[in-house]
Amino acid sequence: MPSTALTYLDPLPRLIALPGVYRPQADTLLLAGALAREPLGRGVQVVEIGTGTGALALSAAARGADVTAVDVSWPAVLAARLNGWRHRLPLRVLHGDFAERTRGRRYDMVVANPPYVPGPDTRLPTAGARRAWEAGREGRAVIDRICTAAPALLRPGGVLLMVHSGMCGAQKTVALLEAQGMSAAVTERARIPWGPVLRGRAAWLREQGLAGESEDQEELVVIRAQYV
C-alpha cells in the first residue's frame, strides 16, 4: 500500500480506541484513500457501517458531509462519539445492526469496513473484539448482507465503498452487487503481510484452499458500486 495513504487520515491523527475496538489499520487506510477521491461536501448524506473508532466517518464529516455511523459494539460507539467530540465534528453514532438502524433511510454514500476474515467457526461472536473480524467460513457473512441491502440504502446515483480481503472473492462481491442492479468494480488493491489472526489460522486457510502453501500476504480490495 502506498505510504501516501496515511495522509488521508492526517486531519484525525489521534483517535481514542477503547479496549476491544478495532483500530485503524491497512484496510482503513486503503478505504480512506478511496473515500478521499469521492466528491463529498455540505448536504451529502453518508452512513458508515462498522465505524470502530469513527476514523472514516470523521474524515467524511471533516469535509462537510452529514454523517451517521453504526456499530454493533458499545465500546466502538462510545469511542466514535468521544472522537467526534474531541475533534469537534458533528457525528451521529448509533448502536446496533446496520439494517435495523438505517431502515427507511437513504444516503448518498455507504462506507463499510465489515468483518471479513474467514474462519472455522460457523457461529459469529456476539461480544468482544472478535466481532470486528470474524465473518464465517467464507468471510462473507456481513459482506453479503451489505450487498443485498445496498440498493435500499442508497439514493439514485449513490455510491457504496466497501473494503474486504481478496480471500472472500472480490468478483463474488461485484457479481452480487450487479445482481442488485448496481454497477460495481474493484477500484483499489493492496497487499499486506498477514497479521496475527491470519497467521494463527494459516493451516486452516491452506486446507480450505484460501491461501497457498507458502503464502503469507493478504490482498485487500475496495469495491465501488453505484446505484443507477
Image (cartoon, rainbow, N blue to C red):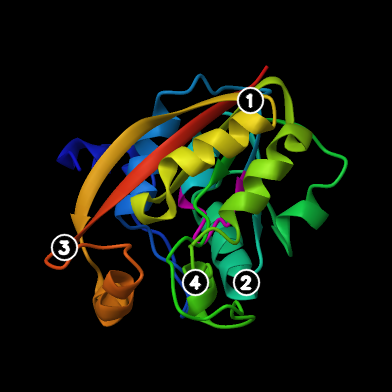
* Mark with earlier residue (4, 2): 2
* Separation of marks 3 and 1 at Cα, in angstroms: 33 Å
Q: Which residue is mark 1?
A: 182
List x then y, in percent, for residue 145. Answer: 67, 52
Residue 138 at x, y = what percent? 48, 63
Disc 1 residue crowd, few under 14, some 14–19, many 20+, Cα 10 Å: many
Q: Which residue is mark 3?
A: 215
Kind of residue at badge 3: Glu
Q: Which residue is mark 4?
A: 134
- Determine whether 105 is above or below 139 in the image: above
The residue to which callout 2 is attached is: 73
Amino acid at the residue labelled 4: Glu
- The image quadrant of residue 176 is top right
Quarter assignment of residue 85: bottom right
Task: Say which quadrant the C terminus sits in.
Answer: top right
Q: Position of residue 10 (x, y in %)?
A: 31, 42
Closer mark to the observer between disc 2 and disc 3: 3
Along the line of sight, the residue nearer the viewer: 8 or 116? 116
C-alpha separation, residue under disc 4 versus residue under disc 1 = 27 Å
Range of magenta residues: 48-55
Residue 112 vs 182, above or below: the answer is: below
Q: Is residue 65 visible?
A: no
**Residue at the image position 11 percent from the left and 66 percent from the top:** 214
Mark positioned earlier in the residue sequence (2 or 3): 2
Query: Of the residues under marks 3 and 1, which one precedes in the sequence?
Result: 1
The residues bearing labels 2 and 1 have C-alpha atoms spaced at a distance of 30 Å
